[in-house]
Amino acid sequence: CFKDIIKSASGVYGIDENLIKAFISHESVGIPNAVSCTGAAGLMQLMPDTARIDLGLNVPNYGTEKLAKCKSYINIEPSKCNKIHTGNCDLKNDERFNPEKNILAGTRYFKQQLKNFNENEKLALAAYYAGPGNVDTICGERSFEECRNDLSELRPKGSVPAYVDSILDEKDKFEALA
């Protein structure tokens, strides 16, 4: 699914197609209308402000109450509410739900993180997940391996290194299928 869009995003931003596939598989299980507990949405799970401000996508300002309605599973334990499909968001006007715009924007955002972290793929993955400010504050000039334990203290505990490992494992699986 989304093969042509992935190929285009890979060509535009120089990111391995298998890594983009890994993002999509991990972040949304390929469901274009997926919304996380934190409000990240679409195939590559873009946060509203990141998508709107940093990437220039049209994202309605849901506000706290409207976002709660968009995320139809507010009281579910966070570890159980990822990748849930919802029909309560503004699917027509929120460009994060447009597969082409989401994949291109998510790939561009990852490329930005690669540049921010001197082409260090693991730090860029950590930044994609936990935010570049958090990763920069915790790691500074250290490598991912050197700050791995410190990154483990971020939301929820241990999730950042696990996210990085999972994305890279999924990338390897896609490479093996090629």
Image: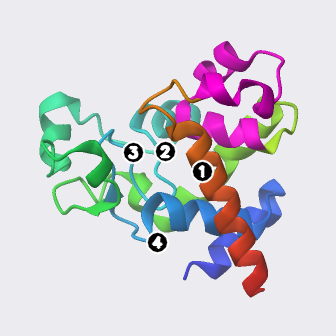
Q: Where is residue 21 shown, x and y percent of the image?
A: 63, 69
From the viewer's perspective, is 22 left or right of 85? right
| Residue that label 1 marks | 105
- Which mark is on residue 40? 3
From the viewer's perspective, is 40 left or right of 75? right
Q: Amino acid at mark 2?
A: Leu
Magenta span: predominant SS is: helix
Badge 3 or badge 4: first in the primary sequence = 4
From the viewer's perspective, is 81 left or right of 17? left
Q: Amino acid at mark 1?
A: Ala
Q: Where is residue 53 shown, x and y percent of the image?
A: 51, 30
Q: Could you give the CA–CA distance between mark 3 and mark 4, rounded to whole angstroms?
A: 14 Å
Q: Could you give the CA–CA distance between mark 1 and mark 3, rounded to whole angstroms?
A: 13 Å
| Residue that label 4 marks | 30
Q: Amino acid at mark 3?
A: Ala
Badge 1 or badge 2: first in the primary sequence = 2
- Magenta range: 122-151
Badge 1 or badge 4: first in the primary sequence = 4
Q: Where is residue 159 shown, x and y percent of the image?
A: 50, 40
Identify the element where label 2 is drawn: loop
Callout 3 touching callout 2 (CB < 8 Å): no
Callout 1 touching callout 3 (CB < 8 Å): no
